[in-house]
Image (cartoon, rainbow, N blue to C red):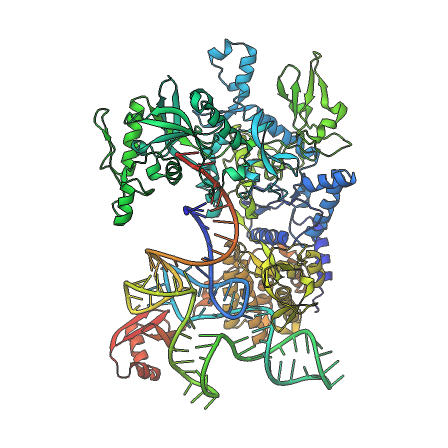
RNA sequence: GCCCGGGUGGCGGAAUUGGUAGACGCGCUGGACUCAAAAUCCAGUGAUAGCAAUAUCGUGCGGGUUCGAUUCCCGCCCCGGGUACCA
């Protein structure tokens, strides 16, 4: 038999489609397994070789699970709202829906050419009004939910208690009060705005180099705009706590924990000298209060104006004006020197009555804590730097007993900053009954906190870095908000029977310069009149791309439902997702957002699980070789030739260095999966992507590597396709042993997602078959089953060639039999002082005393003990023998 | 700075409740087949020395624990990712 992969793959893909082999339905007689890929954005560039990596991994698991009796849900869909289709519309006038449909068709064709076992009847598309109807529906739920701090959960807005004092002030106050509690709210906010994309974006979308995640430019700035926000920080504690039970990579959990940024500390009130005002600060180290020698307000702090003395007024005004002009990047640049201005005002340190200066400085941020700090320059590097610049007193209250003498002296004299633990000094005030000298850090924090609390000066506080999620975008190609802004100021959402609110046709897709959305050109669509003649205007922003992906995994459980987002029965049966595979780039974006929505839906009784994704796996990126000159500038791959393992310019002969880089058009090193499928087949592509290295590692693509696995498949065909290689009768012991080792290794490795070593074991098995020349029918057929999850087309073809009538995809997995692995002898490595020298084959279960005798009697041993004495003989049964000589 | 990963042949990578380092694949070398080439099959392939048996060295660096360390401990170096005046 020839390996005609084109014919084989076409034939089986057709068979699976015609027979709906992978259609999944609720079946309570089987355990369920929900295996999900992060659905792609269908870009115009088509599938990238990175896509099939995760898809193949989940497909192997799904096929393995089916063979093990699981009812598997394995769906695919399109996260199809997004910028490129809109940019294309701006340039060409082509409606994004047309571009999107075309791209989805390409993606579907490409994915289907890989033989992935998706249930295509469940395909969804976030831009389909039948889908985004329910995205809008969930938004109205967020709008109509408030967070009950006491019960630590979201509740219906109708259950929100209105305090009498609010009620007494009339309906407007009540409505404002309610609006202030909704999880989705519309308000003025300091937001990130990208000048390139002409839209606002979320905190999470602004990368640490100040660039915008979507477009990569650094044209991101702060603006004050009225926007839709979601109160995700209410769920901070639940989002944090939920991580513990999840089977997720530790790194992703850590990233989410860091992003949520919980810190415990205390709020402390400082009296402001000469006023009856108080200044409240947040600190994680209330125990260092004795060392607080000055205070700092953020430039935007509301008290700045009030407390500044007339003598300092001009200086403070100047400073704030300059701070406002600075870009955020400048302001947060650690390398720059600290700046600030004295307000002229003093505060009273409550723990020792000291009069301390109040400053304004931009190293304190308004968005965290209270926007004001107590500064402890002796033990905080930022405060130390500032105090040194402005000659503010520095008091040491933590004696660095274990530091070297020079440093310790400096610290004690306030000439150096000490941020680690030390013994408290100067930390007692007999008059006020507070003393922490001699205590541990934990006790110090506790003692000061409870002293503050009992004196009405402060209380323990928890703070989070997590901020409200900016949820609106000035874009056309997104879900319209089901929202009306009425002329009397009321903001309302559409009722369920008014959904979906479809995207209107517009002539201009371009957003305005000053932040107005393309939908503001939508004419009649914009204007609404209610039954009382009240006029309103529809929301013209659209939802961010995250909205559709926040709940798509739920829709897959019941994708055609037009009465509800999904039925309770389907959700109950399929959720949670048992395995979720995708790239690590969503660690704090999609994965945090969807957990948040899921928890809200859980609180409202719409979903039955607290967490959506039980197990998460991040596949690594597939890179490619690229070339650079000695000075490090990159060279397109088509200008490079190889000679004897070195790389040279075709034109100039200059030698280049081979490096590993992301595939990119400019480097001309992009690999198109279509070409690979054409030249080597889908099975080879699948196999190679799994064989190249561990699934979670980044690894480079090599054409020769594909040839390697292609050759393996060809060898499989050459051996098993030739029925003269198949013998009758009993299988040899040796072959049975390797076969069962392979069953065990492949099963364990699929379970552990170590596909590269599973494949190498199948290669070992095949090499063995070539060596022995003949195997029996049962051995061959068992091997096809092991191969099936990886190379399903070829496995089905061989399965059929051997006369099996039913399709292999649901045939039970082979059973591993330990008894074929038992050996009668073991080849012991004999080592001297830990160095293995030779081998000795001995019966298994030989008593240690006999092993010792046998080793000492062996001719090789003499050489190593000659002239030395044996100190000890260590025998680890069926592992190793070590002789210690002196 | 802080938090995660990671460092093993020419290359991708195997192997860890501490027990034969380098499975499998690529590349390379030699052989068979062929008029020849390609493809394929067979053999070899960590480095150094040696015809060879074999010996010495060898898992980023320096120590330590142990009969025995890629694996455990301490101290460093380098690379990748995340994050950052978060008080």
Query: Which residue reaches farthest left?
Result: A430
- Of residue A80 and residue A206, the one placed in the foreground of this image is A206
Q: In the rendered view, does A453 fall on the left or right side of A247?
A: left
Residue A594 position in % (x across, y down): 55, 37
- Of residue A271 and residue A687, the one placed in the foreground of this image is A271
Question: Which of the image's four quarters has the N terminus of chain A?
Answer: bottom right
Question: Which of the image's four quarters has the C terminus of chain A?
Answer: bottom left
**Residue A464 quadrant:** top left
Residue B75 position in % (x across, y down): 34, 56
User: Can residue A633 be spotted in the picture?
Assistant: yes
- Of residue A307 and residue B5, the one placed in the foreground of this image is A307
In the rendered image of this protein, does residue A591 appear above or below residue A794?
above
- Of residue A42 and residue A717, the one placed in the foreground of this image is A42
Q: In the rendered view, does A486 fall on the left or right side of A311?
A: right
Q: In the rendered view, does A82 fall on the left or right side of A289?
A: right
Residue drawn at (56%, 46%) of the image: A585
How many numbered discs sit on the rendered protein? 0
Residue A836 position in % (x across, y down): 37, 74
Query: Which residue reaches farthest front?
Result: A311
**Residue A590 quadrant:** top right
User: Can residue A790 be spotted in the picture?
Assistant: no
In the rendered image of this protein, does residue A490 appear above or below residue A13?
above
């Amino acid at each position: 038999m020839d390996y005609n992969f084109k014919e084989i793959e076409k034939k089986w893909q057709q068979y699976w489609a015609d027979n709906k082999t992978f259609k999944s339905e609720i079946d309570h007689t089987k355990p369920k397994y929900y295996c999900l890929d992060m659905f792609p954005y269908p870009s115009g560039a088509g599938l990238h070789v990175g896509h099939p990596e995760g898809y193949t991994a989940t497909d192997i698991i799904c096929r393995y699970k089916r063979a093990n009796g699981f009812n598997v849900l394995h769906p695919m869909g399109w996260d199809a709202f997004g910028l490129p289709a809109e940019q294309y519309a701006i340039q060409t006038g082509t409606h994004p829906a047309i571009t999107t449909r075309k791209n989805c068709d390409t993606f579907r064709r490409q994915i289907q050419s890989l033989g992935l076992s998706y249930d295509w009847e469940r395909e969804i598309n976030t831009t389909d009004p039948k889908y985004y109807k329910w995205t809008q529906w969930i938004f109205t739920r967020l709008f109509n939910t408030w967070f009950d701090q006491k019960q630590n959960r979201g509740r219906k807005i109708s259950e929100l208690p209105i305090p009498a004092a609010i009620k007494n002030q009339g309906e407007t106050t009540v409505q404002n009060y309610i609006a202030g509690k909704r999880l989705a709210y519309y308000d003025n906010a300091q937001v990130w705005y990208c000048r390139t994309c002409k839209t606002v974006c979320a905190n999470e979308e602004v990368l640490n180099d100040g660039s915008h995640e979507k477009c990569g430019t650094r044209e991101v700035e702060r603006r004050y705009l009225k926007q839709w926000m979601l109160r995700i920080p209410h769920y901070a504690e639940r989002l944090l706590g939920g991580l513990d039970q999840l089977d997720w990579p530790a790194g992703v959990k850590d990233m989410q924990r860091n992003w949520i940024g919980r810190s415990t500390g205390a709020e402390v009130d400082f009296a402001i000298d000469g006023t009856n005002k108080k200044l409240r600060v947040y600190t994680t180290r209330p125990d260092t209060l004795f060392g607080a020698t000055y205070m700092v307000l953020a430039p935007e702090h509301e008290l700045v104006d009030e407390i500044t003395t007339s003598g300092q007024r001009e200086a403070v005004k100047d400073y704030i004006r300059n701070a406002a002009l600075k870009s955020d990047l400048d302001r947060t640049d650690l390398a720059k020197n600290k700046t600030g201005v004295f307000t002229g005002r003093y505060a009273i340190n409550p723990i020792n009555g000291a009069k301390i200066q109040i400053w304004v400085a931009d190293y304190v941020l308004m968005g965290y804590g209270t926007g004001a700090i107590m500064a402890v320059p002796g033990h905080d590097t930022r405060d130390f730097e500032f105090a040194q610049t402005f000659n503010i007193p520095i008091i040491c209250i933590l004696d660095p007993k274990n530091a070297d003498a020079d440093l310790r002296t400096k610290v004690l004299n306030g000439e150096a900053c000490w941020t680690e633990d030390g013994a408290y000094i100067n930390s007692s005030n007999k008059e006020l009954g507070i003393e922490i000298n001699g205590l541990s850090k934990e006790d110090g924090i506790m003692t000061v906190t409870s002293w503050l609390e009992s004196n009405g000066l402060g209380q323990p506080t928890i703070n989070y870095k997590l901020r409200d999620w900016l949820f609106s975008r000035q874009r056309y190609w997104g879900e319209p908000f089901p929202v009306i802004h009425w002329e009397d100021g009321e903001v309302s959402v559409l009722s369920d029977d008014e959904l979906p609110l479809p995207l209107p046709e517009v002539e201009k897709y371009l957003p305005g310069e000053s932040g107005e959305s393309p939908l503001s050109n939508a004419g009649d669509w914009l204007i609404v009149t209610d039954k009382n003649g009240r006029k309103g205007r529809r929301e013209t922003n659209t939802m961010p791309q995250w909205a559709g992906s926040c709940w798509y995994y739920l829709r897959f459980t019941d994708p055609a439902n037009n009465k509800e987002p999904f039925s309770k029965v389907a959700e109950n049966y399929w959720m949670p997702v048992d395995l979720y595979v995708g790239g690590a780039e969503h660690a704090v974006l999609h994965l945090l957002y969807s957990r948040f929505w899921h928890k809200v839906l859980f609180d409202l009784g719409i979903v039955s699980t607290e967490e959506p994704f039980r197990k998460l796996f991040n596949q690594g990126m597939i890179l490619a070789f690229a070339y650079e000159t000695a000075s490090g500038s990159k060279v397109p791959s088509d200008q490079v030739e190889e000679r004897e393992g070195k790389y040279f310019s075709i034109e100039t002969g200059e030698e280049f260095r081979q490096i590993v880089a992301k595939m990119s058009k400019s480097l001309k090193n992009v690999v198109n999966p279509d070409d690979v499928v054409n030249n080597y087949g889908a099975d080879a592509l699948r196999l190679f992507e799994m064989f190249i290295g561990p699934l979670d590692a980044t690894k480079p693509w090599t054409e020769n590597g594909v040839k390697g696995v292609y050759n393996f498949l060809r060898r499989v065909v050459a051996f098993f396709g030739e029925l003269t290689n198949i013998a009758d009768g009993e299988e040899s012991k040796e072959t049975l042993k390797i076969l069962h080792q392979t069953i065990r290794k492949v099963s364990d490795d699929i379970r552990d997602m170590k596909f590269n070593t599973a494949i190498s074991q199948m290669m070992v098995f095949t090499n063995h078959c070539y060596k022995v020349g003949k195997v029996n029918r049962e051995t061959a057929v068992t091997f096809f089953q092991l191969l099936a999850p990886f190379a399903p087309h070829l496995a089905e073809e061989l399965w059929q060639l051997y006369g099996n009538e039913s399709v292999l995809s649901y045939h039970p997995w082979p059973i591993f039999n330990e008894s074929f692995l038992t050996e009668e002898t073991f080849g012991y490595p004999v080592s001297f002082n830990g160095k293995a020298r030779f081998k000795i084959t001995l019966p298994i279960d030989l008593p240690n005393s006999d092993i010792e005798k046998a080793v000492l009697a062996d001719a090789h041993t003499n050489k190593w003990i000659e002239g030395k004495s044996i100190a000890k003989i260590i025998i680890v049964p069926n592992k190793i023998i070590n002789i210690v000589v002196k």
